Image (cartoon, rainbow, N blue to C red):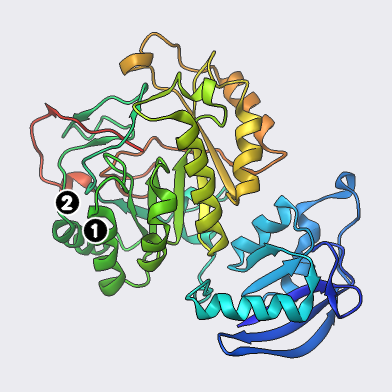
Amino acid sequence: MKIALATSDGETVNRHFGNTPYFVIAEVTPDGFEMLESRENNGGCGLTLKELNINCFDETVALVSDCGAVIAAKIGRAAVSELQRNNIQALEQAGSIESLLARYAKYLGRGGYRPAAPRRSLELEHPCFALGRPNNKGRVHLPVSPGCNIACAFCSRALDADRGVLRPGVTGEVLTPREALDVVRRAVELAPEITVAGIAGPGDTLATPYALDTFRLIKREFPNLLRCMSTNGLLLPEKAGELLEVGIDTLTVTVNAVEPDILKQIVFGVDPETLIRNQLEGIRRVSSAGVTVKVNTVLVPGVNDKHIAEIAKAVSEAGATVYNIIPLIPQNKLSHVREPECDELDAARRGAEPYIRVFRHCQHCRADAVGVPGGRDYGELIYGARAAQENTFSHG
């Protein structure tokens, strides 16, 4: 694979990605590396944060678009976002070019990062990454993960066959991986606009093995479908290798606080410091391997509503590129807390925007949703109706 290295002297990586005058391009394999050429960066960005504009990276990203990775002394969060959107690994390292290339060759030899084959833009193919752009693509959610390893105060645990109940953690039934594969077959036949196979519960996708088993089946039979999953992130560092092995394209991690004193008011049954540490480390691991990471935060008035900018900054620095702030649905242990007002939700989003791109059109999808968000739900034609009954389900 090709690697671009930001340099001013051709010998050391010593410049920021956006304003480097040159990139040295090398071909790297597990057996070593070969210097190929030097490319002048005529479209470099300004030197100050005041001058920073995400559009200024277009020419620089285009300059290295045939590379699988970029190494620079510093890569800002906007540049990281643009590179990851283009399936280019972003690495902050400084030092001798030859030394860094030798280290990367060894990394590849240990089974490290391999860029995926170029994909269609997520903004065109995944409704959750359209970021306000017109999008008529659909998804099929597969409810194969019944268990959870934490307890969220806002989570209401139930099976509900009523398709009018629209919120995370709700499904009419729980499937086996084989049953889920059959659902995908029927879903893409009924709705050819479906481009995404997603697993978002009804429990946490990494608390049981069923989500990863399902994606292994989908990868073999439907290799062109984007594979998307959600998790609370508690087991993400431990399961990152398996997640990459099944070829996850996009990952959503629910991060409700990055301060333990705030998080313990929202999440129970787990040490808040451990959860925060694992979430951020997991995001770092999968994003550095080329997976696009979105972070969800449930906005709870009086609890984490003044904490949103800190969350956005932390998850962006860890490698997340899209942020979705979800208004609380008052229920369970937070049934006494009011739903956020529109101006509060808007203020939270504006507070996050300096750090990360904000997703604004969440539909509160069920764990068994099928079709284009906001359009027709094909679930009633695919999932068998079952009487609603209480169970121990939770969403991640």
Q: Nearer the viewer, residue 261 or 138?
A: 261
Q: Secondary structure at mark 1?
A: helix
The local secondary structure at tag 2 comes to helix
Q: Tell me, yes or no, if residue 66 can be seen here.
A: no
Residue occupying the point 35% across, 12% down: 335
Amino acid type assigned to the residue bearing label 2 in the image: Ile
The residue shown at (18%, 31%) is: 160
Q: Is residue 99 above or below residue 395?
A: below
Rendering coords of residue 95 (x, y %): 80, 70
Work out whether 146 lies above or below 221: above
**Quadrant that contains the C terminus:** top left
Q: Name the mark on residue 276.
A: none
| For residue 286, side relative to residue 231 (left or right) | right
Task: Quadrant for residue 92, please give it.
Answer: bottom right
* Residue with the mark numbered 1: 187
Amino acid on which the number 1 mark rests in the picture: Ala
Is the residue marked by circle 2 packed among few (<14), some (14-19), or many (20+) residues within 10 Å? Answer: some
Q: Position of residue 251 (x, y in %)?
A: 45, 52
| Residue for point 31% across, 45% down | 376
Q: What is the C-alpha distance between the residues marked 2 and 1?
A: 7 Å
**Image quarter hosting the N terminus:** bottom right
Mark 2–mark 1 CB contact (< 8 Å): yes
Specify few, some or many for label 1: CA neighbours under 10 Å numbering under 14, 14-19, or 20 or more: many
Q: Position of residue 224 (x, y in %)?
A: 37, 71
Residue annotated with mark 2: 382
